[in-house]
């Protein structure tokens, strides 16, 4: 069976925002990439994306001795996946389109190739139905942009072979990602559900007049958000218990937190709530365009990744 370090050729199927970023990531790790997308503009988009992403990858030391042009565009998806040991699928977030795509390319896959879908929240058990070899299909859900954000969520469908999940985890590890394995399928996987849970209360805070959009966001970005880039919520609370750790934390603050849980909001995104959020975001931007805000986010994200890499002595 294929070993992760034996992967030299990958295919990127669907080359929009996520597919282009995966292309940069795979190239940086010295892999040869075959890219396919039905949109004729996609080739130029990927070229421009990789060119733009490459300096950041080099700065992070993630593209040493790699070739940013070691990729080819194929209009025919079957030609793209033929010969690839690992296929990352990034087509539109639509189950019917993904199923049709799998039916189209399945016969062209190499005997031991794995197909990982970047799907943000679709269930692999549903996507792999009708596939001839469903055991090779798995979810490998990245965070945007995959070439910079380490997390990949890996989860199999009902028919995915456990060994395929192991190989997928090993492959992502080998290319410098931080894969986590989910033990069962749920809509939205894990990280998006965690974001959704927090955002639900954030929307409730705005909609109920507790605080403005800007202040709700500051309550995260200037507070717990700083810690969450370093450690997850359990380990942060474990430290909140001092030398007694999680045991003391639960004893001391657990009952209060349960009271807050019972009081959490369940807002709906009604037209009124939507208008409040849209206006609140406009005010919080203080005249800066989304392009300016995105540039600031990307600059600070790079600085943070560089710092973490230097301090932890790890790559990615
Ligand atoms: N954008 C995000 O933040 C994000 C994050 C993680 C995962 N994802 C997931 O990644 C996948 C792609 O999302 P995106 O944001 O890159 O979307 P996108 O719209 O930017 O790209 C989708 C691409 O798929 C192409 N496409 C259309 N039909 C196709 C087909 N039959 N075969 C192959 N390609 C086809 C389109 O031409 C387009 O280039 C989705 O499943 C999405 O849920 C998105």
Image (tube, helix red, strand yellow):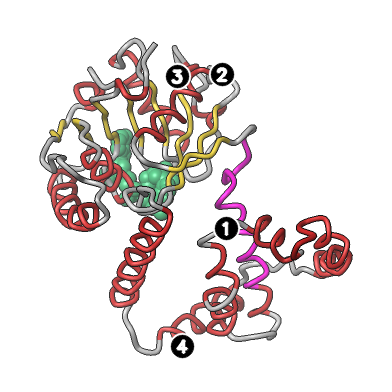
Establish if 177 lies above or below 113. Answer: below
Kindly identify which numbered label has been placed on residue 159. 2
Q: Quadrant of residue 155?
A: top right
Q: CA distance from mark 4 to mark 3?
A: 48 Å
Q: Earlier in the sequence, mark 3 or mark 2?
A: 3
What's the magenta region?
A: 185-203
Q: Nearer the viewer, residue 133 or 217?
A: 217
Q: Secondary structure at mark 3?
A: helix
Kindly identify which numbered label has been placed on residue 89. none
Asked whether the beta carbons under mark 2 and mark 4 sit within 8 Å of each other, the answer is no
User: Is residue 301 part of the magenta span, yes or no?
Assistant: no
Q: Residue at x 55, y 19 (%)?
A: 162
Q: Earlier in the sequence, mark 4 or mark 3?
A: 3
Asked whether the beta carbons under mark 4 and mark 3 sit within 8 Å of each other, the answer is no
Q: Residue at x 29, y 34 (%)?
A: 13
Q: Nearer the viewer, mark 4 or mark 3?
A: 3
Kindly identify which numbered label has been placed on residue 136. 3
Q: Which residue is mark 1?
A: 231
Say few, some or many: other residues with alpha carbon within 10 Å of mark 4 (under 14 / 14 to 19 / 20 or more).
some
Q: CA distance from mark 2 to mark 4?
A: 48 Å
Give x and y (percent) for residue 220.
57, 74
Q: CA distance from mark 1 to mark 3?
A: 33 Å
Q: Which residue is mark 4?
A: 283
Q: Is residue 212 left or right of residue 301?
A: right
Q: Secondary structure at mark 2?
A: loop
Q: Secondary structure at mark 1?
A: loop
Q: Residue at x 32, y 21 (%)?
A: 104
Q: Nearer the viewer, residue 196 or 239?
A: 239
Q: Earlier in the sequence, mark 1 or mark 4?
A: 1
Q: CA distance from mark 1 to mark 2?
A: 34 Å
Asked whether the beta carbons under mark 1 and mark 4 sit within 8 Å of each other, the answer is no
Establish if 175 lies above or below 275. Answer: above
């Amino acid at each position: 069976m294929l070993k992760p370090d034996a992967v030299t050729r990958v295919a990127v199927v669907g080359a929009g925002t996520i597919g282009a970023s995966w292309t940069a990531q795979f190239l940086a790790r010295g892999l040869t990439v075959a890219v396919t997308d039905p949109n004729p503009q996609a080739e130029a988009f990927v070229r421009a994306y990789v060119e733009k992403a490459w300096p950041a990858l080099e700065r992070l030391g993630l593209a040493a001795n790699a070739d940013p042009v070691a990729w080819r565009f194929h209009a025919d998806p079957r030609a793209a996946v033929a010969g690839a040991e690992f296929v990352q699928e990034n087509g539109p977030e639509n189950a019917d389109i993904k199923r049709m795509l799998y039916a189209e390319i399945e016969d062209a896959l190499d005997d031991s190739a794995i197909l990982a879908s970047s799907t943000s929240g679709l269930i692999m058990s549903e996507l792999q139905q009708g596939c001839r070899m469903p055991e090779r299909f798995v979810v490998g859900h990245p965070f945007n942009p995959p070439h910079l954000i380490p997390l990949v969520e890996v989860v199999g469908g009902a028919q995915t072979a456990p060994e395929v999940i192991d190989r997928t985890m090993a492959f992502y590890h080998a290319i410098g990602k931080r894969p986590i394995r989910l033990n069962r399928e749920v809509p939205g996987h894990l990280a998006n559900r965690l974001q959704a849970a927090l955002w639900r209360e954030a929307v409730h805070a705005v909609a109920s007049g507790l605080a403005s959009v800007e202040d709700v966001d500051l309550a995260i970005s200037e507070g717990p958000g700083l810690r969450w880039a370093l450690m997850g919520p359990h380990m942060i609370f474990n430290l909140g218990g001092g030398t007694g750790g999680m045991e003391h934390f639960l004893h001391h603050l657990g009952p209060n937190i349960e009271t807050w849980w019972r009081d959490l909001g369940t807002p709906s995104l009604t037209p009124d709530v939507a208008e409040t959020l849209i206006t609140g975001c406009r005010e919080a931007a203080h005249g800066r365009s989304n392009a300016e805000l995105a540039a600031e986010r990307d600059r600070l994200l790079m600085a943070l990744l560089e710092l973490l890499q230097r301090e932890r002595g790890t790559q990615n």
